[in-house]
């Protein structure tokens, strides 16, 4: 050992005593080489233990999985793109404050990519819509209590019922058809059949005079449907033709009409907007229609015009008050005949291929429900996407 120490301390350039074996390699050199090889070996093992480079995904940061995070991650990993959207109604799979901005969701990294880990993904809920697994649960931040029931309202953070309760869709720019079937909740058996038979992409409109609307809304939302409320508006030959209880009229004061509007709005929750029921005279009167549209803008709701009146001022007033607007292209079941219905639906497809989208409005008649259901199946095969009505809205707040 003393000789080794002297060898290390010997100045460069001086002769080195040959070893007994005559190999020319000193014990010190061997020891130094072993040290270097050990360092290289350990470094290589660390570097190659896991895959050094991973595919770029939507994972931003990896964190160790705690028991709680593990359960959340496993649930999120099994979710489909539709069901993976966060919801502020229950807070499921979401950490951090319940706001309308981007939120943090724990998900599982891909299998076979090292030990299980939790990862952090940033998503913007306004671009996805509500988590369909809990779509029937009202978001308390979007409810204003009233004497007649829950009223929709913008949340304190600016989120609108129009955004939160919208059904997710692909976002593709292909030919899209939105179908709205109204009159739900008037007939209990008819409502049950319509919700069960109509494809989930079809939007359902509830009549405020109906019964058990809250229950039917939950069934519809659990089935994946987007829903809207119908509001009775005065037609030209009113009251000989009467839309029903609490109709908004041109002779009523703004306060009276707002009271009737709020009654209709309070019949249930979890809807994205309202659609007129009749109303050719009312929608053509700016003095009567103006307060209605301003109220919808304040509450964050859309307005769907069924397209039955060419004199409707709804498009202009909606733009003025920041209300998402949808204009119907045709009433699909004015004639209760299967051939006539199919002709109207095929016309919607042609319109969608020409301008990108089309909107059809019908009622929950048995023939309408059956015909729409079968047509939707065939239209999808031809490359038509059936979308919720919110997907084709002109939204002044989003430009």
Image (cartoon, rainbow, N blue to C red):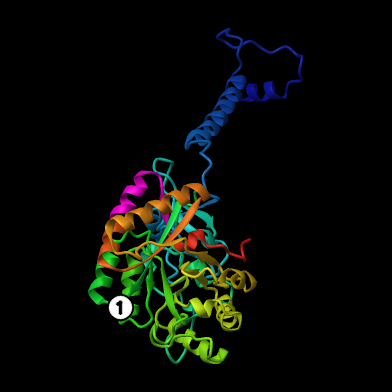
Question: Which quarter of the image is occupied by the N terminus?
Answer: top right
Q: Which residue is mark 1?
A: 186
**Residue sitting nearer the eye, 72 or 101:** 101
Q: Is residue 32 above or below residue 96?
A: above
**Residue sitting nearer the eye, 362 or 188:** 362
Secondary structure of the residue carrying tag 1 is: loop
Q: Is residue 386 magenta?
A: yes
Q: Is residue 254 above or below residue 92?
A: below
Q: Position of residue 261 (x, y in %)?
A: 48, 84
Residue visible at 58% across and 7% down?
A: 22
Query: What is the magenta range?
Result: 374-387
Residue visible at 52% across and 54% down?
A: 121
Tell me if I can see residue 270 in this picture.
no
Residue 254, quarter of the rendered image: bottom right
Q: Is residue 296 magenta?
A: no
Is 347 displayed left or right of 36 in the figure?
Answer: left
Q: Position of residue 140 (x, y in %)?
A: 46, 78
Residue 18, quarter of the rendered image: top right
Q: Position of residue 141 (x, y in %)?
A: 50, 77
Q: Residues within 10 Å of mark 1 (few under 14, many from 20)?
A: some
Is 315 displayed left or right of 361 in the figure?
Answer: right
Residue visible at 49% across and 68% down?
A: 164
Tell me if I can see residue 274 in this picture.
yes
Question: Which quarter of the image is occupied by the C terminus?
Answer: bottom right
């Amino acid at each position: 050992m003393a000789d080794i120490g002297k060898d290390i301390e010997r100045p460069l350039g001086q002769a080195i005593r040959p070893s007994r074996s005559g190999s020319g390699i000193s014990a010190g050199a061997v020891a130094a080489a072993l040290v270097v090889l050990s360092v290289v070996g350990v470094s290589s093992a660390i570097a190659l233990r896991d895959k050094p480079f991973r595919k770029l995904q939507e994972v931003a940061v990896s964190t160790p999985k705690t028991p709680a995070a593990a359960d959340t991650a496993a649930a999120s990993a099994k979710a489909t793109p539709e069901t993976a959207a966060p919801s502020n109604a229950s807070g499921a799979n979401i950490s951090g404050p319940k706001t309308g901005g981007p939120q943090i969701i724990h998900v599982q990294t891909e299998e076979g990519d090292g030990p299980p880990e939790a990862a952090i993904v940033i998503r913007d809920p306004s671009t996805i819509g509500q988590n369909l697994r809990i779509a029937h649960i009202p978001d308390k931040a979007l409810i204003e209590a009233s004497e007649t029931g829950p009223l929709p309202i913008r949340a304190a953070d600016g989120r609108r019922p129009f955004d939160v309760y919208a059904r997710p869709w692909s976002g593709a720019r292909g030919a899209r058809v939105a179908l709205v079937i109204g009159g739900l909740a008037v007939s209990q058996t008819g409502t049950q059949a319509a919700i069960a038979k109509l494809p989930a992409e079809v939007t359902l409109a509830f009549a405020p005079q109906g019964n058990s609307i809250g229950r039917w809304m939950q069934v519809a939302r659990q089935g994946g449907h987007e829903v809207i409320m119908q509001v009775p508006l005065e037609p030209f030959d009113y009251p000989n033709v009467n839309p029903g209880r609490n109709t908004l009229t041109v002779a009523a004061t703004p306060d009276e009409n707002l009271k009737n509007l709020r009654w209709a709005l309070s019949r249930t929750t979890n809807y994205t907007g309202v659609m007129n029921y009749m109303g050719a005279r009312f929608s053509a009167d700016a003095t009567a229609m103006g307060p209605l549209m301003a109220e919808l803008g304040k509450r964050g709701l859309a307005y769907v015009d069924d397209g039955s009146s060419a004199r409707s001022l709804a498009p202009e007033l909606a733009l003025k008050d920041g209300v998402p607007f949808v204009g119907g292209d045709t009433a699909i079941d004015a004639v209760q005949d299967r051939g006539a219905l199919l002709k109207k639906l095929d016309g919607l497809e042609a319109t969608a291929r020409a301008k990108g989208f089309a909107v059809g409005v019908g009622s929950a008649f048995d023939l309408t429900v059956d015909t729409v259901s079968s047509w939707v199946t065939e239209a999808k095969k031809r490359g038509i996407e059936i979308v919720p009505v919110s997907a084709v809205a002109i939204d002044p707040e989003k430009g």
